[in-house]
Amino acid sequence: MFLYILILDLSNIDAHSFLDLPIMEDFNRIIESLSVRFIRCRHLDILQSVTVSNAYDVENTLIVVGEDSTITLESTLETAYADDILFIPAGRACHITFGMRDRAIRIGNEEFIHNREQYFRKHVPTEQLKNGIRFQNYLHINFEAKVFDSVSFFNSLDIPPFLIRGNKYLLQITREIARESQTHAPGRERVIQLQTNLLAIAIIRHILESNQFVEKLATNNTYFRDPRLIDIFTYIKNNLSGDLSNRVLAKVANVSEDYVGQYFKMLTGINPQDYIEYQRMEMAVKLLRTTKKSIRAIGNEVGYKDTAYFCRRFKMMFGIPAGKMRRRESLLNI
């Protein structure tokens, strides 16, 4: 949806030899610029099979399928089984079935958010053993990964949700994150953060080594080499409540006002004002989840002086009112 990052056609390159190419300097630059942040980890049981339409979150979502469990990505009808992983890039809506498709109830994202306790609960392994009941279950991890602390990286690749199978290294990382999340040992936060950094890198490596999404990734890397664009991203991030018109951005990049929109879209694939709205809404979600500020105050803080307009745009982007977003920590929080 946003920035296209990689720079050459990978279709005729062997996945194993690819990592030896000089172009890896560009990918190393991407990784070095990444700001990765752990958000949350949940292990949930499925109480009722359900298909969620337009499931959406502003953070990257990684779901590890538990023993005797299934999750189906409805866009491709691919089903994930035990130890498979479903990765959903930040900001990408998708249709997902948790449990058995032939028994699943189909609901929308808003209905799911308000009634999720009907379909999920926190994983209770001891109760399963006691009652002889095996609930389908999965491990759910949310994290943020931004390029130059400004742009959501996996969203920028414009890739759809996808399944990862047979990646033992990635599974090991997710289990370590889950294990640390359950403890109160010294250094818990530091270990989780280190593992989350490894998680982001492991997903990038998987995409490259499996030679996925060639058409999506085959473009230029001007973004990483043009300091004017980096200046624009930094300015937007630091001034979400202020004037971010093309006139202002033109001064930041030292280009003409008539040219700045074309310049931004040429390098990123998106209009600057669309990018700005996404950044403002992403910050609004963070404030809704982490503060007790009023919706009016949050709207003002992210650049919307008209609260009614902010609420309309918020619902249009996320499918639910801002007040309802506040009452959840994540797509599947229990």
Image (cartoon, rainbow, N blue to C red):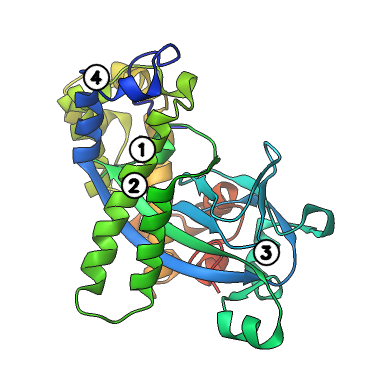
Marks 4 and 3: CB-CB under 8 Å?
A: no
Q: Which residue is mark 1?
A: 204
Q: Residue at x 32, y 34 (%)?
A: 245
Looking at marks 1 and 4 on the same chain, the residue that comes earlier in the sequence is marked by 4
Tell me where residue 28 sits by quadrant.
Answer: top left
Residue 168 against residue 292 in the figure, above or below = above
Q: CA distance from mark 1 to mark 4?
A: 15 Å
User: Nearest the camera: 10 or 167?
Assistant: 167
Q: CA distance from mark 1 to mark 3?
A: 30 Å
Tell me where residue 183 sits by quadrant.
Answer: bottom left
Marks 2 and 1: CB-CB under 8 Å?
A: yes
Checking the image for residue 315, the label placed there is: none
Say which amino acid is labelled 1: Ile
Q: Position of residue 254 (x, y in %)?
A: 16, 23
Q: Secondary structure at mark 1?
A: helix
Decide if residue 10 is on the left or right side of residue 332. left
User: Nearest the camera: 266 or 142?
Assistant: 142
Q: Which residue is mark 3?
A: 112
Q: Secondary structure at mark 4?
A: loop
Q: Residue at x 31, y 29 (%)?
A: 246
Q: Residue furthest bottom?
A: 130
User: Nearest the camera: 137 or 278?
Assistant: 137
Crowd rating for badge 4 (residues with CA inside 10 Å; few <14, some 14–19, many 20+): few
Q: Which residue is mark 2?
A: 200
Comparing marks 1 and 3, which lies closer to the viewer? 1
Q: Position of residue 127 (x, y in %)?
A: 62, 85
Q: Which residue is mark 4?
A: 23
Looking at marks 2 and 4 on the same chain, the residue that comes earlier in the sequence is marked by 4
- The answer to whether residue 297 shows anywhere in this view is no
